[in-house]
Every structure is written in structure tokens, then in C-alpha cells.
Image (cartoon, helix red, strand yellow):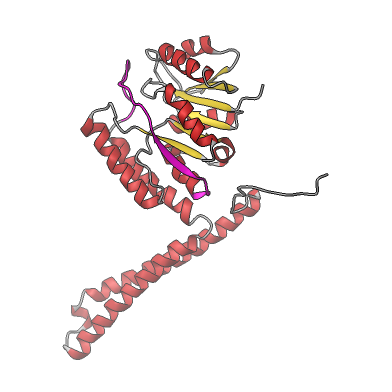
Amino acid sequence: MTPVLSAVIPVFNESGNLAAFEAELSAALAGMKVPHEIIWVDDGSTDGSFRQLSGFAGAGQRVLKLSKNYGQTAALAAGIAAARGEWIVTLDADGQNDPEDIPRLFAAAAAGTDVVSGWRRNRRDPFFSRILPSRAANFIISAVTGVRLHDFGCTLKVYRASLLKAADLYGEMHRFLPAILGYAGASVTELDVNHRPRRAGKSKYGIARTFKVVLDLFTVKFMGDFITKPIYLFGGLSLALLAASSLMAAWTLYNKFFNGIFVKDQPLFLVAIFFALVAVQFAFMGLLAEVLIRTYHRAYRKPPYAIAAELGGDGK
């Protein structure tokens, strides 16, 4: 039977948590009375996790083993590509996500929402090393992308598979999936979920990830707002620099003719020249980016749009 819901779980060195988590997950999915599958993705574990996962493989459960530790985004991408369900739910394997929340998230998704994201309102993590940086990152992501969520970092989410499979996942982009799909026109909502203390092992996350979030955010913003019209970004920067350069040059000339200050005595004129040169560079970068984008779409025949629905036909 083709599954309706696919659960994708990336695993990296979680041998102390897998047995209990698998039992909880299987029980929660079985109670939903919905055809489902579980896809475990071992991301190069070195602690015996794959040996445990091999014991789970069978009817309704599949195990993928990556050749090395590629990171959570790559592991999720592998599981998403293998998923056969109409809906995909993602969870962490450390047991902090509660499988009992899946039915509520799935019900909200099935009611007509493309992405239902979990919100760990009461997180069971250290405040200064985990919660505070996460809140700062969530605020910045919401402000920049326009997708307002309290908790982008919660792995427990339900996605419409057709939209999720169309998303390109690279680097550390998994945390931006709601924003990426939001740019594609997906409806996104958020529900409270239970968050539990880690039973065993240690967290793979640290404060350093906050800096990665800020860097990745530049990519998400560009890919979401300017990927089909890069000249708007580079051209806008070029015009802003040219305007600033013109104002500084005009002020320099004003000082020369009305205040008797020679140009050589005004460093602002050098800054005006520098801004003008950079403005020209940005303009040409925008033109080159436009050529590259058009070449990409023609080469891969990938349209710059996504069709959300199609009605009607010839009935044949």
C-alpha cells in the first residue's frame, strides 16, 4: 500500500536513544490509522547506531546509510528523496521531539496547510548556549524572510511532499525550509509541540551555529527574492552608491567654489570616486547574474514559477 505519511529521521551517533524512540514513533504512527512508512537515514554514525537501525528495517521501515557524515541537511535530503508519502514528517532521533505530536500536526496539514511547523514553546535546553541564540536567530529569520515563526530550528514539521521534494537542499538549509517553501507560495503555520530533555548522548548543536544561520540567511534571501531578477539587487546597490557618490562630489565642488577649499584638501572626493567605481562594478555584476540566470533556466528547462493547482481538461 502506498504510504500517505512518510517519517524521515536523520541519525548521527544516537545509539542510546534509538530503541525507545523507535518504539514511541511506531506506536504514534500506528495509532493514526494512516498508511505510513519510516525512513531512517544514518549520517555516518560511528557509535553503532547503524547496527541498531538495521534491526528496524522491514515492513514499513527503511534504512539509508550515507557513506560519511554529510550533515543534517544532506541526511534529510536523502530521506526526502526516498519518501513515497503524500506528506512528510521530519523528526530528530535524539528523543527530544515527541512522536505523540505528529497526529495534531498531520491533522492541521491535511486540513489545508502546506507546512505545519513545531514550536518548542517550553524548550528543555540550556538557556544561554541554546535558547537565547535560537531566539535571536528566529527573530532575524522572520524579519528578513517575512515568514513569521517562533521556532525555525524545531525539526518536527509536516510538509506537503510535492512542495518539499521540489526544494533544493544544500549546506545547512534545512532550518530555512519553511521560509524557502514560503517563497514558493506554500502556506505555513505553527503549532505548540512538546519538547523533552535528552535521554542519552550529547547535542550536536552549539552557539557557533548562530553565525552559520546569519550567513545562510543571505543565501535564502537572495534565492527567495532575487533569484529570477538579480539586477534588482545589484542594480539597486549600484544606484544607491552612485547617488551617494554624486552627493559627495557635489559637496566637494560646493566647498571649492564657495568656501575656497581645494579638491586635493578634501578626502571626501576620493571616497566619491571609490563609490562610483564600485557602483559600476555592481551594475556589471547584475548584468552577468541576469545572463547566468537565463542560461540556467534554459539549460535545465526549469521555469521561474511553481503551479499550485490545475483544474479542468479535455476529459480524455
**Is residue 281 in view from this perspective?**
no
Quadrant housing the N terminus: top right
Residue at screen point 57% across, 35% down: 161
Quadrant housing the C terminus: top right
Residue at screen point 47% across, 66% down: 284
Q: Nearer the viewer, residue 208 or 39?
A: 39
Q: Is residue 43 above or below residue 238?
A: above
Extreme bottom residue here?
258
| x then y, percent, for residue 249 | 29, 79
Residue 199 counted in the magenta span: yes
Residue 236 counted in the magenta span: no
| x then y, percent, for residue 81 | 58, 31
| x then y, percent, for residue 168 | 53, 41
Q: Across the whole image, how many numbered discs are drawn on residues?
A: 0
Residue at screen point 23% across, 74% down: 268
Q: Main secondary structure of the magenta part?
A: loop
Q: Nearer the viewer, residue 307 or 254?
A: 307
Looking at the image, residue 106 sits to the left or right of residue 250; the answer is right
Q: Is residue 284 above or below residue 190?
A: below
Extreme right residue here?
316
| x then y, percent, for residue 283 | 45, 67
Looking at the image, residue 77 sits to the left or right of residue 249; the answer is right
Looking at the image, residue 132 sits to the left or right of residue 21; the answer is left
Q: Is residue 160 above or below residue 276?
A: above
Q: Which residues are magenta?
A: 183-205
Q: Is residue 209 above or below residue 94?
A: below
**Is residue 20 in view from this perspective?**
yes
